[in-house]
Image: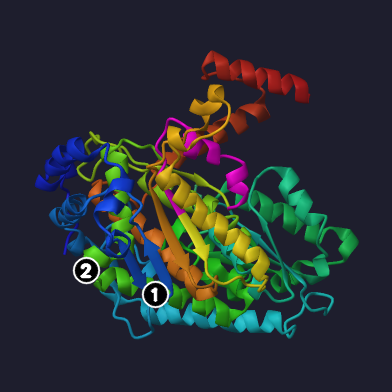
Amino acid sequence: MHISKINPTTTAAWKNLEKHFKKVQHVAMKDLFAQNPNRAKDFTIRWEDFYVDFSKNRITDETFRLLLQLADEVHLKEAIQAYFSGEKINETENRAVLHTALRASGNADVKVDGVHIMPEVISVKEKIKHFTEAIVSGKQKGFTNKAFTDVVNIGVGGSDLGPAMAVEALQYYKNHLITHFVSNVDGDHIQDIINKINPETTLFIVVSKSFTTQETISNAKTIKDWFLSREFGAKQEDIAKHFVAVSANIEKAKVFGINPTNIFPMWDWVGGRFSLWSAVGLSISLAVGNDHFEKLLQGANKMDIHFKTEAFKSNIPVILALLGVWYTNFYQTESEAVIPYSQYLDKFVAYLQQGVMESNGKGVDRNGKPVNYQTGSIIWGGPGTNAQHAFFQLIHQGTKLIPTDFIGFVQSLHGNKGHHDKLMSNFFAQTEALLNGKNITEVDGNEAVIPFKVFEGNKPTNTILINKLTPESLGKLIAMYEHKIFVQGIIWNIFSFDQFGVELGKKLAGDILNDLEEGAFVNHDTSTSELLKYYVNLTK
Ligand SMILES: O=P(O)(O)OC[C@H]1O[C@H](O)[C@H](O)[C@@H](O)[C@@H]1O
C-alpha cells in the first residue's frame, strides 16, 4: 500500500467542487435547515461518548458527496492503511509514523523494517508504570531520603506541549505531585521554576527526542548545576536519584550524565508533536497515575479504530478534515478557531497549533513541486467563555470567515450545575448566533446604530459535545485532531511528518550566538547587524 502523489486539483471531484462552489458559495445555512428538517440528524455523528454535529456548515448533500469523492480519488483508504501498517510514509526522513502503535493493544502486529515493535513498546510502558508507582507511592526517594513532591519536565515543542496540555487538562485526576514544565531558553522561565522547588524532593525529567535541542539542553544543564551547587550537599552520584531522561538518542543522554537505567527510550517513528503517548508522557503518568495514563492511550486507540474502520461518510476525523479543505481551498479561508468550553483545556489550542501548523505548513507537494493551492490553516483560539469576551467580535462581525470548532462537555467535573449550565448555555448560544445572525428587521434601538448591530450570521461551526472530560475522552479528542491533520496532508499531497521549516532559524541563531561571543557582526544584512550592535552596546 502506498500513498498516492496526486495533485488534488486534478481530480474530477475537485473540478466538480469548483463548479459546485460557484453555485452554493452564498448559500444561507438557515435556508438549508428550513428545507430539510432532518439536516441536524443527517449531519451529526454519534459515536461512543461523542456527539459531533457538523450541520452548521455551508454544505449541501452534494457538497458532502463531492468531498467524500475527493477522499476516494486521492486514495485516502490506502493511505490510512499505509499509515497504520508502519510504512515509511515520512518519506523525506525515511521513517514510519507510528504514534498509533503506542496506544495499540499488545498483540497488534506492527513491524518496522520487518521487526515487530510491540514488545519494545510494551517494555517501555512497563518501565513507565513501575517508575510511576515507585515515585507516587513515595517508595523511591531523593538523595536525603525524602519522598518526591515535585516533578519538573524539561523539554520544548513536542517534548513539552503535549504533556503540559494533558497534565493541565486532567488536573481533576491529579495526585499530590506538583508538576512543572520548563521549556523556554529564557532564563526567567527556569529561574521561576527554581524558585518554587526543593532539590531534595524534586524529580527532573529531561525530555528530548534528539537530545540536541538548545533550549532543553541549556535548561537541563542549568538545573543540574543548581542541583549540584554546594549549598544543597548533593553529590555527582545523587544525579541518578533525581534525573531521568526520555530520548531516542540514548548515547547523547548518557553523555549528559543520565544513568542508563534512568533513560526511557522512544523511537524515530514517533514524531515529536505526536509523542505524548510515548515515554514523553511520563510526566502525565506521574501526575495522574499510570491507570489514567493508560486510559488516555485507550481512548486514542478507540479513535484510531474508528478512523481506520468507519466508512468515510460517518468517520469523524475524515469529515472534519474534508470540511477544513472545503473552507481552505474553496472559500479561501486562512484560519480555523478552536474553542474548548473547559478551563482545563486552556493549553489545548497551543498544543494543536504545533500539531497542525508544523505538520501541514508546507508549500511543496509530495512530488517535490510547489503547490498551486492553499495548505495548512492557521489554528488559534482559547477557552470559552473567556474567548467570547476577547476575540469573538471578529468572528461574529468581522470581514473574515472563520470556521470554528466548539468543544464542550455534558457533565461538569466538580458537579457545580449552576455554573455548568451557564457555561453550556454560552456554548450552545454561540453556535446558534453564528448560524442565524440578526438581520436589520430584528435590530431595535436608535436608527443611526442599526447597521452596526446587524449580525450577518451564516458562520460555520462544528459542535463536538463529549459526555465528560476524562483521560479516555481526552485521548479520543487528541487522536481525532491527529487524524484530521493526517487526512488533510494526504489530500493536499504534502509530507505532514517532517519539519524542515524550523531549521533555518535555529542555524542562524547558532551563528549569531558565536558572533555575540566574538563581538564581530559580518555576513548579516544591515538591519540585523545594526540590531546586534545596538544589543551588544547596551549589554556591555
Ligand atoms: O524533542 P526534541 O528533539 O528536543 O525536539 C523538540 C522540538 O523541536 C524541534 O525544533 C521541532 O520543531 C519539534 O517538532 C520538536 O518537538
Residue 391 highlighted magenta (yes or no): yes
Q: Position of residue 198 (x, y in %)?
A: 83, 65
- Asked if residue 524 lies left or right of residue 332, the reply is right
The colour scheme used here is rainbow
How far is disc 1 from disc 2 in space, using C-alphas?
17 Å
- Residue span colored magenta: 384-405
Residue 165 highlighted magenta (yes or no): no
Residue located at (23% from left, 64% from top): 312
Q: Secondary structure at mark 2?
A: loop
- Closer-to-camera residue (296/509): 296
- Quadrant position of the N terminus in the picture: bottom left
On screen, 326 above or below 468?
above
Q: Is residue 210 visible?
A: no
Q: Which residue is mark 1?
A: 301
Q: Point out the frontmost of discs 1 and 2.
A: 2
On screen, 45 above or below 509?
below
Q: In which quarter of the view is residue 347 placed?
A: bottom right
